Amino acid sequence: MTDDDLLHRNAAEPRLVVYGTGWCPDVRRSRALLDTAGIAYHYVDVEEDPAATKLVRRLQRGQRRIPTLVWPDGSFLVEPTDDQLRAHLIDIAAKPGDVSD
């Protein structure tokens, strides 16, 4: 599967995709915030999925910073603070559609 296939597959999913690693405290923090808020998401470990790593690098112009959160509308956040993530969730919730499935 190419990184384009991964991006299109994720864009078709009705929820957020979180790219990260199990060892990263920022990934754990962002996932905990999403879990507490009841936001459904698909988690992809970039160390176990080479296509996901390529996608993250493409979005970040060569970087591989995590967490990288990608919404079905194509918007994404890289290493968001809790405040940035909350603000984005509020913005998404104000738009038609439901990010929480």
Image (cartoon, grey):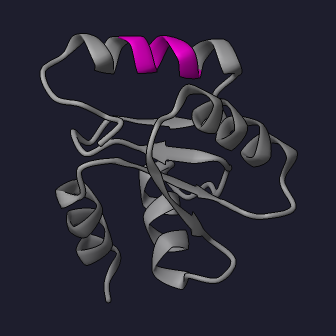
Q: Is residue 48 above or below residue 39?
A: below
Seen at 44% across and 18% down, the residue is 88
Q: Position of residue 96 (x, y in %)?
A: 12, 21
Q: Position of residue 75 (x, y in %)?
A: 32, 35
Seen at 67% across and 50% down, the residue is 65
Seen at 58% across and 35% down, the residue is 34
Seen at 26% across and 42% down, the residue is 74
Is residue 88 a member of the stretch shown in magenta? Answer: yes
Locate residue 81: give its quadrant. Answer: top right
Q: Position of residue 7 (x, y in %)?
A: 29, 64
Q: Position of residue 14 (x, y in %)?
A: 23, 50
- Between 32 and 49, which is closer to the camera in this rendering? 32
Side of 62 relative to 17 (left or right): right
Q: Is residue 5 above or below residue 84?
A: below
**Picture mark count:** 0
Is residue 81 a member of the stretch shown in magenta? Answer: no
Q: Is residue 97 above or below residue 63?
A: above
Locate residue 92: give its quadrant. Answer: top left
Side of 4 relative to 39 (left or right): left
In the rendered image, the quadrant that contains the N terminus is bottom left
In the rendered image, the quadrant that contains the C terminus is top left
Please give the range of residues in magenta. 85-90
Q: Residue furthest left?
A: 96
| Magenta part, dominant SS | helix
